[in-house]
């Protein structure tokens, strides 16, 4: 981790990313849950790496507005029991709800700046909508009614 930084992200070819969070600014349950969720998102193609070159994450955000992603610290009573983080996704956004007390505001702010670069500039693209396409509805099947006249006497 570079000196003076609370968040450091390095992505590598092959849809891999290393995210380092300053250990004095996050609690371990948050780190484990973030790993679990992001492993699912990337592994199932819900977020995909667009392109990569060394050091691209350290460049300042260009403000392209491709997508919105950010961390929000919320009161524990608003979170499901036993959860420290919960992503809320819509087309073009992913808001990470973080249970209060599991990260500092400083690490949240630095992560939000990093997410502005990652999602806002389209370095990683949200692809969940592509996987949620529903097949067309089949032709309506006629409702079968009992015959008016009994089939057997």
Image (tube, grey):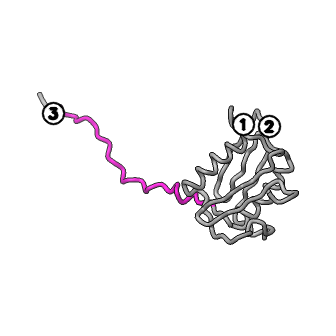
Residue 55 placement (x, y as % from top left): 74, 69
| Between 77 and 32, the one nearer to me in the picture | 32
Q: Residues within 10 Å of mark 2 (few under 14, many from 20)?
A: few
User: Residue 138 magenta-drawn?
Assistant: yes
- The correct choice, above or below, for 31 with respect to 65 in the image is above
Front of the two marks 3 and 2 = 2
Q: Residues within 10 Å of mark 1 (few under 14, many from 20)?
A: some
The quadrant of the image that shows the N terminus is bottom right
For label 3, the residue is: 151
| Residue range (magenta) | 126-150
| Between 40 and 144, the one nearer to me in the picture | 40
Marks 3,2: beta carbons within 8 A? no
Predominant secondary structure, magenta span = loop
Q: Using the numbered discs, state the Cα–Cα distance from disc 3 to disc 1 in whole angstroms.
A: 60 Å
The residue lying at 81 percent from left, 38 percent from top is 101
The residue lying at 36 percent from left, 53 percent from top is 139
Residue 43 placement (x, y as % from top left): 56, 54
* Disc 1, SS: loop
The residue lying at 75 percent from left, 43 percent from top is 98
Residue 61 placement (x, y as % from top left): 79, 67
**Snapshot quadrant of residue 26:** top right
For label 1, the residue is: 79
For label 2, the residue is: 75
Residue 110 has which mark? none
* Disc 2, SS: loop
């Amino acid at each position: 981790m570079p000196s003076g930084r609370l968040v450091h992200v390095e992505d590598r070819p092959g849809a891999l990313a290393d995210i380092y969070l300053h250990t004095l600014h996050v609690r371990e349950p948050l780190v484990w849950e973030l790993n679990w969720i992001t492993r699912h998102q990337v592994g199932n193609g819900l977020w995909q790496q667009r392109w990569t070159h060394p050091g691209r994450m350290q460049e300042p955000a260009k403000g392209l507005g491709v997508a919105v992603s950010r961390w929000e610290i919320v009161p524990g009573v608003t979170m499901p029991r036993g959860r420290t983080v919960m992503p809320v996704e819509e087309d073009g956004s992913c808001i990470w709800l973080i249970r209060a007390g599991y990260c500092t505001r400083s690490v949240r702010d630095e992560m939000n700046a990093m997410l502005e670069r990652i999602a806002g500039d389209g370095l990683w693209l949200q692809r969940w909508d592509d996987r949620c396409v529903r097949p067309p509805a089949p032709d309506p099947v006629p409702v079968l009614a009992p015959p008016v006249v009994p089939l057997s006497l």
